[in-house]
Every structure is written in structure tokens, then in C-alpha cells.
Image (cartoon, coloured by chain):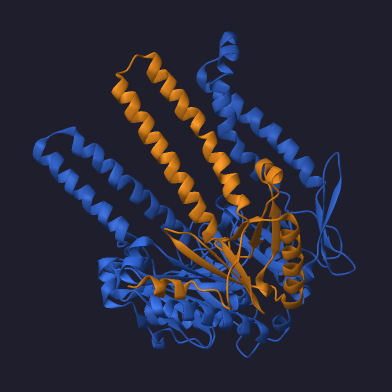
Chain colours: A orange, B blue
Amino acid sequence: MAANDVDAAFAAPHGMWTPVSPRLATARRILLAMALIPLAAVGVVLGALRVTPGLIAAYAVVSLGVLVWGWWLIGRRVRSFGYAERADDLLVVSGILVRRLVIVPYGRMQLVDLRAGPIDRSLGITTVQLHTAAATTDATIPGLLPLDAAALRDRLASRGEERSAGL
Amino acid sequence: MSDDLREPRRTAPLTPVLQGAPAIPFFVVFAIGPGSSFLGDLGLSIVVIAVLGAVVGFVITVVFAWLSWWKRTYYFDDEGDLRVDSGVVQRSSRRLQLSRLQNVDVVSPFLPRLVGLVEVRVEVAGAGDSRVVLRYVTASDGDRLRREILAKSTVPEAAAPEGSSLDLLARVPTGRLLGGLLLRSVTAGLLLASAFFIGITILTQGPVGLVIALATGGLPILIVVGEFLTYFGFTVVRSPEGLRLTYGLLSTQRRTVPADRVHAVALIAPLLWRSRGWVRVQLTIAGLGDDPTRAGRDVLLPVAPRQEALRVIAEVLPGVDLDALPWVSAPARVKWRSPIQGSLLAYAITGAVIAARTGRITRRVQVAPHARVQSVRLSEGPWERRLGLASVHADLAPGPVRVVAHHIDLGTARPLADHEADLARAARNRGLPT
């Protein structure tokens, strides 16, 4: 099956998906870099145990390889996020390996969350999450600029109120 | 109950005794366990200690239960809401706004039933602890209380009984219930495995097979016995407030399922039930999702012939003919993704509902009205991508029902998702089906 069919299935309703900030990639790469610490610690222990240098080198190559792969994957994953506001519903896409698209009618939103952890705050990004009565609704938009996030939340909230239809 | 329900009244005087009784084993264990080291020094035998523990524990519990019983009263206030005043030291007065009533259940647990008492559970919509349990009242009081609460709750249809107000829709005979429980796919498989291991034990005279057989046979038998006791004598009756379910051997449950709170329906047919044409019906009911007592409360029919099940479902999903759904099968290449159930996977969309069919061994048909769909999801995993397939999920309130059109043609998936979102919105704007 051609790739453009997949793209067609996950295409934005009109024009382009609104992307999220590339700062999200920075935030996730900081977390990835933190994973270096235990990896390095294991390397030091291996060194202290006088394991054959060949093994240590192999270990270093593999862990660096994983890190580089993760670094690259984060970039792709962050670029895969997007959202679009239609007249009656919000669409969110995400994912590379498993691609997802969620359509949430405004009338069904029960609450809109804004979240930002310490790393997010220092970089100036916020996560917007939509909740409906269904626990399986997975509509999360990470990596929005705080002003954009607040504006999106307010728009969603007012549209939700207009179209609210209970359960 | 003598006369006016507006007078504060207590629950049945036997209540403290019934509440004390379950504490006896605990006190006996305490007495012969940690207590005996001290009491044994006094030269008392273990039997005396046990009896002493039982009596002392019982008396203490009953005294406290009696105090709390004495201080607990219930009545209908001037606005027609149910009030419950309680508390020995710190008094509290709870008011249940009956216009927001969700549910009244009359339940008879084992011990109280022996003396003709029941407990009444009242639930109203609202955050936090919005439920009151009156234990215990006499069976006739319970019934009267239930009717009174329903009458005062201004459930509009409740006041207008249509001809014969109580129609028996379904009854599950004991034999069918037991047979159905034993023939469920996993249960039957495990019991078969146990028979196999017992056979091995007899042949080899070794203990290993027997131990395995105990594990594979014991658990399903426990489950079968548990469900048998729970669903014994299952009846479904149509009443003005909704479907009334009554079931249970040791503890009788009476539940009312209001049609307007049903979000989705699942029809489940295990392999060994199909030759007999049996199905189980489960519901997703709004507000039941995170209720710890949900277990078993989502069953509409434990085991019933298909036609009977469809008749009962018609009460909660009016105007939907589950035998005439326009099924759209997954494309043939789905066998590379789901070799076993692939050829059975299908979805259907009508003006009123979205439905999905899954399962080879245990077949499931799961249906939800468009008006109940909370959001629509399109997903495509790597293996699906290779085959040009995608899945469309209709997100529903938490419950046992999942409506997913698995592995449909990629080209139709996005239009289906958009279409379902439109239908869901339109159905909601028209108002909920009643």
C-alpha cells in the first residue's frame, strides 16, 4: 500500500496540521540525556571490574547507538504531533510506528487540562489534554507555547459550553 | 412502617444484632490468637476462651451498633427529599435530593433475609459520596420506601403506568444458568484440562498432575459457584422506571436499569453456547464505570436464548434490529493480521447505532448509539500499514463494551471516522434517544 494513502487517511481536514513547538523535542532530549547517567555508571563499573576493553567498547558503541537513535526518533515523533480545529470538533494526530487520529466533538469535552512539568516550564511549553466521559479518549497535545495553550483551552472551553449535550 | 413517612423513624430494631454477628469470628480469632497468651495464664481452656471472645465481642459490637442505630433516623422532609440523620457524638444530617435520583436498590443479604429484613440503597447524581444505605428495614417497609422514593423523584414516566405495568420479559432457568456457566470457553477449557491432568495422575500415580488439576479446576469451579449464587433465579421485568432485574440465591439483588442511562450493549456468545443459541448480554451504564461494586452490575442477562435477549435489548435500544445490521466485513487480506478471527471481523453503521463484530471462539457483537459516542479514533499499527488497513474506535463511557471496527480498508477508514463523528454530533443535537 502506497505511503500517500496512509498520509491521505491521516491528512488534516483543511491544509496543514498545526504543529507543536520544536522545544518539545528539546525537553524530551533532556530526559533522554538523563538516561546517559545510569548508562555511564554501568560503564564505569564495567571499567572498575577490569572487563575486557573490547566488551566495554562494544557496550559504549551500543549505548551511544541507542542514544543517537532515540535522539533522531524524538525529532520525528515531535514532528508527528499536530492538531486542527474544525467547526464542530478538534482533531489530534500523533505517532510514527502506530499512527493515531482522534476526533473529539466540542460538545463532548468535559474538561481541558493544562500541564507543565519543571523541564517544560523552563523551556516554556505546556501540554493540553482533553477529557471526555470516555476514559479511552486519547487527545493530548504536548509542546504548545503557554500562550497558545491557554488560548486553545479558552476556545475549546467556550465551544464546549455552546455545544454541550450532557452525556 | 406505621403511617407517615415524614415522621423521623429508625431502621428495624434487630439491626444492631445483625451487625454484631459478623464480628464474632474476628473476636474469636483474636481471643484464641493474641488474647490466649494472657487468658491462658488464668487457666482457661481454649474452648472457654473462644466462647468468651465471641460473647464479649458480640456484646461490644452490638452496644456500639445499637448506639448508632438509636441515633440514626430517616424521613422525608417538607421538600420531599430523603433525610438521614445520624451520628452519636457528632451529628450529621444528610439530604438526598431525590430529583437527582439515579438508583434505588432493595437488597437482601443472607443474614438479614433469615429474619425478613432488607437493605435499601439510594443513589443520587453528584460528586463524592452521593449514596445512602439504610440497613435494615422490613421487606414491606423496603418496598414501600422504594416506591415512595421513586414517586418523589419525579421520574416523569414513573407516574404513568401503561396498561400492565409489570411484564415479565425474561427468566433464566436454573439448569440453563448452570449449563451456561460451565460451558463458557475459558471455564470449559480449564475443566477439560483438569480432567486431562486427573487422567495423567491416575495413569502415572504421580502427584504433579493432581496439583495442576487442582489449580486448573479449582479456580473455574469457584467462579462458576460464585456466579451461580449471584445470578440464581435471574428475572427481567419491565416496569415504568426501566428494566427491573432480580437475582441472587444467598443475597437477593433488585436493580433497576433505566433505559436512558444505557450507553452500549454487548452480545457475547462463547463457542459451546452457540449450538444452543445462547448469549450473554452486558451493558455499559453511565456512572457505573468507577464504582467498586460494579462487578456483576453490568450484566443484563447472564445466559439467554438469542431471541429472548434481543427482546430485552429492544427495551434499552429501542428501534434497533440487531439481526438486520448492514455488516461490512474486513477485507480478505486481514487474514495476515488476524488469522483466526479475521474473516468474522465486521462493523455496521445505521442511522441510530455503530456496531462491531469480533471473535472466533467467543463471538461478540457490541453496539452503541451514535449519541453515546464520546470521540472517534483512527489508529494504524505497523503491521496494519503493511496491509493497508486501519482501525476505527468509537470511544464510550467506561464499561465492558468496546466498539472497534478492526482492520478495515485504509481507504475507507478515514471517511468512516469522519462520518461517525458527524453522526455522533447529529444524534446528540437531535437529543438522546429515549
Q: Quadrant of the N terminus of chain A?
A: bottom left
Quarter of the image where one finds residue B423? bottom right
Q: Residue at x 26, y 77 (%)?
A: B332
Q: Nearer the viewer, residue B369 or B70?
A: B369
Image: B58 above or below A139:
above
Residue B80 percent coordinates (x, y): 85, 69
Q: Nearer the viewer, residue B159 or A39?
A: A39
Residue A64 percent coordinates (x, y): 41, 36
Q: Nearer the viewer, residue A59 or B357?
A: A59
Q: Quadrant of the C terminus of chain A?
A: bottom right
Q: Is residue B360 left or right of residue B244?
A: left
Residue B276 appears in the picture as rendered: no
Q: Residue at x 39, y 39 (%)?
A: A65
Image: B345 above or below B253:
below
Residue B409 percent coordinates (x, y): 36, 77
Q: Residue at x 30, y 62 (%)?
A: B183
